[in-house]
Image (cartoon, coloured by chain):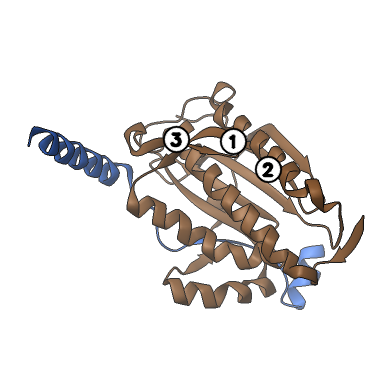
Amino acid sequence: QAEDDSSSTSDKKVTLLPCKNPPNRERVQLWLEARKQYESLQKGR
Amino acid sequence: MTTLTRQDLNFGQVVADILCEFLEVAIHLILYVREVYPSGIFQKRKKYNVPVQMSCHPELNQYIQDTLHCIKPLIEKNDAEKVVVVIMDKEHHPVERFVFEISQPTLLSISSDTLLSHVEQLLRAFILKISVCDAVLNNNPPGCSFTVLVHTREAATRNMEKVQVIKDFPWIVADEQEVHMQEPRLIPLKTMTSDIVKMQLYVEERAQKT
């Protein structure tokens, strides 16, 4: 009932989340592997 | 002891800075402890005088920063009731929700000499609790992702709008399935009461994760 009353004054409770998603695990895993390869190449020089 | 209102010294801004800095550390640590991302992207750092794990993945770090940048105006105006880090399974159903319940006093009674070190001490205890929370939680299924929810009031979202446009980081109203979990197990982690903020952290864990 409290939420119904407050909605009339346009101050009802809302839950928000970002439209964008964070990078997924697979993408991050690929980045990590690429970074390891780069670092081992740097060490080999 | 001095009594100040929220307008004095732009206190809301100070509280928002402190809380957003803390939430950034907490989010990184939750993602590490709950194995949402490979452990190789995390590096040990020292925050609040304790070791923590922080991601070094640029895109993920930017995402967390942008998220908190948008939440900050709400915290500043005392309009963020809860900030929730939700871990979701492959089907985008929540398996765990780390709920930070935040409230700020309208009148501030400040004994300033020990204030910041006292708050830091309290926040440190939260970090330590998060770092060992895997002991009381069940393993998550593989392939989990995360999102951050903020519980606020419709009128307060105007405080976010300008930041959303600047950062090109729009927010939407969450669906019921993103907010609610069926028969969650409740695990209280930590509560703090200080002169500038009260906060409690608990985890809601889905009974059947697989």
According to the picture, the residue beneath numbered tag 1 turns out to be: B49
According to the picture, the residue beneath numbered tag 2 turns out to be: B120
Question: Which corner quadrant holds the N terminus of chain B?
Answer: bottom right
Q: Residues within 10 Å of mark 1 (few under 14, many from 20)?
A: few
Q: Which residue sits at x=57%, y=29%?
A: B207
Q: Which residue sits at x=73%, y=69%?
A: B10
The residue most toward the front is: B113
**Marks 2 and 1 share the same chain:** yes
Q: Colour of chain B?
A: brown
The amino acid at mark 2 is Glu
Discs 2/3, front: 2
**Real-space Cα separation, disc 3 to disc 1, in angstroms:** 19 Å
Instruction: Check the residue under mark 2 and report the chain it is in.
Output: B
Q: Nearer the viewer, residue B162 or B114?
A: B114
According to the picture, the residue beneath numbered tag 3 turns out to be: B32
Discs 3/1, front: 1
Instruction: Check the residue under mark 1 and report the chain it is in.
Output: B
Which chain did the image draw in blue? A
Question: Which corner quadrant holds the C terminus of chain B?
Answer: top left
